[in-house]
Image: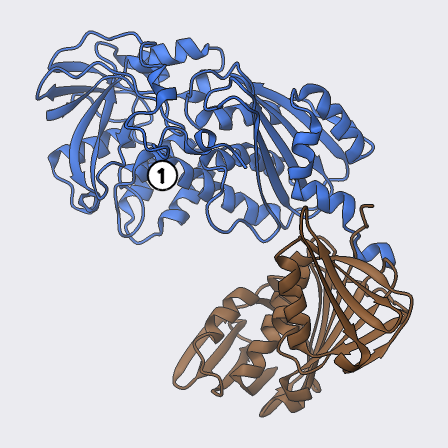
Chain colours: A blue, B brown
Amino acid sequence: MPSLCVSCKGKGLCGRPACPILERFKSLGTTPKLSDNIFGASPPSVFVGRYGYPQVSAGPLVPPEVTGSDAAVYDSPGSWNNLSIRDIVGLRSGLVRSNIKFHVKDASNPDAMLQKTQELALSEKPVDTEVWFSKVPRVGLRFDGVLSPMGPAGEVTKLDIAQNPVVPRQVDKAVSDTDARAVDEIGELYNADITVDHINRLLSIGLLGKQRKIVPTRWSITATDDMVGKMLIDDIRYFPEVNDVLLYSGGLHGNHFEILVFPGAFAYELIEIWMPKAVWSTGATSVGSDWEDYGGKKGYSNLGGGYYAARLPVLEHLHRMHRSANVFAIREITPDYWAPLGVWVVREAAREAVSSVPVSFDSVNDALDDMSLRINTVSEMWRPESKLLDRKMNQKRLMDFL
Amino acid sequence: MFKAIIESEKLKETIEAVSSIVDEAKINLTPDGISVKAVDPANVAMITLNLKSAAFEEFTATEGELGVDLNRLNDILGMAEKAEIVEIELDEESHKLVIGMSGLTYKISLLDPASIRKEPKVPQLELPARIVLTGTDLKRAVKAAEKVSDHMGMGIDGEIFYLEAEGDSDRMRLDMTKDQLISLEPGDARSLFSLDYLSDMVKSAGKANEVTIELGKDFPTMIKFQIAGGNGEVNYLLAPRIESD
């Protein structure tokens, strides 16, 4: 079982008023120039908090005095692969969060401020935005297990968009259709090459589906990863099985992935290993696992959002290969992952791995031996956790008796 | 062409037995009844099922096959009361299954049978031991095993049929002598099975008055029982696990 801190990731399950792990990082950021009126281009980015649900705080994120295309980098994890953890935290700490109180159901009947926030969320390019706060935003840096770090925040009194958003045609179509289900719209947007980040933004600020609601960002991220993933699995199930045993390896920011693909009807398993001294670790190595068989996943993963985030690039890869397979993935989190950056790290690290050139093996056992060379944690600690490997090694098939 | 009238309970039993192995199935139609042969995606468990026309109040069918999403059908049949009469008809024009029950009419889309996993080859097994027991007894043993492990061994020791499970720290063993069973033909038999599969299988088998188990040594087991008041038969095959020690 994963330790309490590893599964909680700052949600407060230990009962302390503030997370002692998160408190450590508060001094990391750089403070942008703050006043009660800021102007800058939102990357675009919106944030919806979960406290007080269904009364939530939501609004655009804006880097003061950063305009035009320079702003895009503030909210595009896909382009952060060459930045260090310190760089990313620094970047995010320059993003000011505006808080406006909404009821989640306001989405279908938005007031002027929500309308502007929604308009901004439609854009695929940065949107010049001016925000007036009730007082100078409080300096701070917030970390979370799922969300990217966030900088200062303040209560908004007035909001203006100083530029027309650039709205892709497919986005416009999905948002104006109030008769389609969110899950179907998400599928169409994804197929039209709208990024998962953009889809998540639309879902979160209440622009998709029949009965529209504002959705806290940390929920909408995983909901998007899961819905897109399920859609891909629906195809993958019917693809022919891979013929070979293939091993992919790679990672990002101390999130190392070994992804083993071998013949079989679709099944996916993720083993998470938190090494001592990695963020959230509490001294000892902590191992958790979850899997889904051909029939799909029921209920929420005990590994949290990381399960769905890691699954997505793997599924995208199988979909591109037009192949179904058994997938056994290990995510080992090393001490190099020393500050929580959000669940996008898991997605990008897995993406890094599946884009490596795979090495082919004669047997699953040979591949596991090779994989063990790059995993710091001894295999005795993770091998027994795997249901998929257990089935592969210990379960006979009926065709063996023909 | 396919048109049938049946007590909802009998149809539910049939669909449930299949859906513990697969989510989608090809249902074969003949003038004598319906049949299914399906294997799970991991090729570990298999079902062959026959439901004779006598199980139906009315039954007319020509040779054909229906691709069915079983979860969807289960869900709809959940609307019917136990003894309620259900009418099913294939609408050939729209290629939908029309299901009627006390005023309600559903039209459910059928799957392209070609998109469903091919029917498996059925291994021909000569299994040395044969045990007949009540479904209730089998279900109880499986439930007991689930409490300590992920797999359960079944075997014959002299004139005793035993079921046992061993977890990290706990064990379960149930011995059944000949007089506690309906019948026993002993033989050299001992195999280990995954409870993931057995648990699903006993959901249906557990309701039968008599369940026949055929066993071998590290060989698949065959679990056989009747449904629909004797007018149908379910035959499960389950591949064994390798004993770890």
Chain on which label 1 sits: A
Q: Residue at x 16, y 41 (%)?
A: A110
Drawn side of residue B162 relative to residue A177, left or right: right
Q: Residue at x 29, y 20 (%)?
A: A126
Q: Tell me the quarter of the picture where residue A287 sits.
A: top right
Q: Residue at x 72, y 24 (%)?
A: A372
As rendered, which of A234 and A394 lies closer to the eye? A394
Work out which quarter of the rendered image holds the C terminus of chain A and state it: bottom right
Residue A324 in view, yes or no: no
- Residue B108, x across and y down, in percent: 49, 70
Residue type at numbered disc 1? Trp
Q: Residues within 10 Å of mark 1 (few under 14, many from 20)?
A: some
Q: Is residue B121 above or below residue A237?
A: below
- Residue B201, x across and y down, in percent: 66, 67
Drawn side of residue B124 relative to residue B10, left or right: right
As rendered, which of B50 and A4 lies closer to the eye? A4
Q: Residue at x 14, y 20 (%)?
A: A131
Work out which quarter of the rendered image holds the N terminus of chain A and state it: top right
